[in-house]
Image: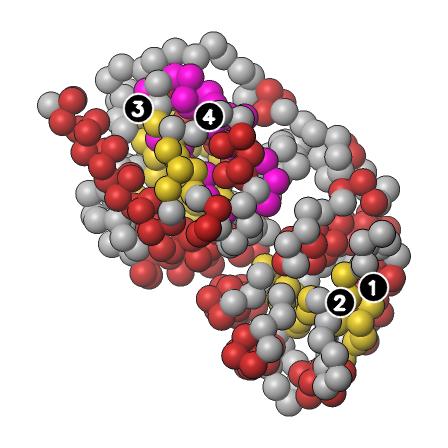
Amino acid sequence: MTKPISVLIVDDSVAVRTAFSTIINTDPGLTLFGTAQDPFVAVERMRNDLPDAILLDIEMPRMDGLTFLKKIMAQCPVPVIVCSSHSQKGSNAAMTALDLGAAEVLAKPDLTTIEARNRAALRIGQAVRTAVGERPNLSSRGVNTDEGRSDARVSPDKILPHRPAVRKGGATPLVVIGSSTGGPDALRQVLTRLPENAPPIAIVQHMPAEFTGPLARRLNGHCQIEVVEATTGDALQAGCALVAPGDQHLIIHREGRGYVVEVVGGPYVSRHRPSVDVLFRSAAQAAGENAMGMLLTGMGDDGATCLGEIQQCGGYTVAQNEASCVVYGMPRSAVEAGVVDKVAPLTEMSAEIMNWFGGKSRRAG
């Protein structure tokens, strides 16, 4: 039997430590390493042994979570999942935590109802397992399946009905990107290498709603292209990337030779909202052979199905290689499904975009 994953909880709130301890203790795949009200106590807890993962608060007395995270990454790297507040300060700190090496950031969960605690339990279990390199056991909890938070899968048909593959002439070249665990840094590496005349880009990054806006703003500050969180009616334009808002699906619609986006709710698809599959299907239907689909690092298989629809329309499909992925899940699923035209390292993804775009532009001219 696989040894349970040991988790250290570091949070100054007694209520949070108690709630998180209950979540860990009731998950058969996890075990509680201990709790600490601040980083100094955490260091004492880890003096003789290390946990497999740490759940870390950011705002704490004596030493803040970001300072502690820096020390962990420098001295004894342990997978760290940061739990941040919903405030702007907390969201910005969460983005910094990802830059410092945190495996994932979670919004401080609502723990006031049984349903909310169940959602928090599933999310924490997923994050811990992913951080230590295991696939999450989504069947270990009795969570409401109507929203797609368990093994019950909802197909993209619930959001956007499937249509036969057709080639779309006369459309503007369009790039769609899907990413999950390790995605914020992967997106930074891809987008910062793109010139101002890059093709329009739409992105789904699996991330809580509180953090997609700060992620877009942070990327925008580093890029030559403009990066913004998408809203319904936004046009997809050259030199601009739109990021799907957390907890909402992103759909692309054709408008003349160009495109506009729609942000919608609805059920989780491929266990996610936003779903990469929904984005990719809409790109296949709107752009056809003028779409390029790219899958970056991430857990699971979201995006693999509808990356195939882009390929069937004559579009170009690319997946990140295993060596450069934080988690080789989504790209692996697409490769194994036979829907990837090229597998490439992360460092070559920007060139893949511009080479494809240049070829499209030459043929159009």
Cα distance in 3D space between marks 3 and 2: 46 Å
Between the C-alphas of marks 4 and 1, the distance is: 39 Å
Q: Which residue is mark 1?
A: 31
Sequence order check: which comes first, mark 4 or mark 1?
A: 1
Colour convention: secondary structure
**Span colored in magenta:** 289-313
Report if the CB atoms under discs 1 and 2 are less than 8 Å apart: yes
Q: Nearer the viewer, mark 4 or mark 3?
A: 4
As drawn, 307 above or below 104: above
Disc 2 element: strand
The kind of residue on which mark 3 rests is: Asn
The C terminus is located in which quarter? top left
- Upstream in the sequence, badge 1 or badge 2? 2
Q: Amino acid at mark 1?
A: Thr
Rounded to the nearest angstrom, the CA distance separating label 1 from label 3 is 49 Å
Q: Point out the tag, 3 or 2, that comes first from the N-terminus.
A: 2
Label 1 Cα crowd, 10 Å radius (few <14 / some 14-19 / many 20+): many
In the rendering, at what x and y percent does residue 194 appear? 26, 49
Q: Say which residue label 3 marks.
A: 290
Quadrant in the rendering for residue 19: bottom right
x 88%, y 57%: residue: 26
Among numbered discs 4 and 2, the one appearing first in the sequence: 2
Q: Residue at x 40, y 60 (%)?
A: 218
Asked if residue 147 can be seen in this view, the reply is no
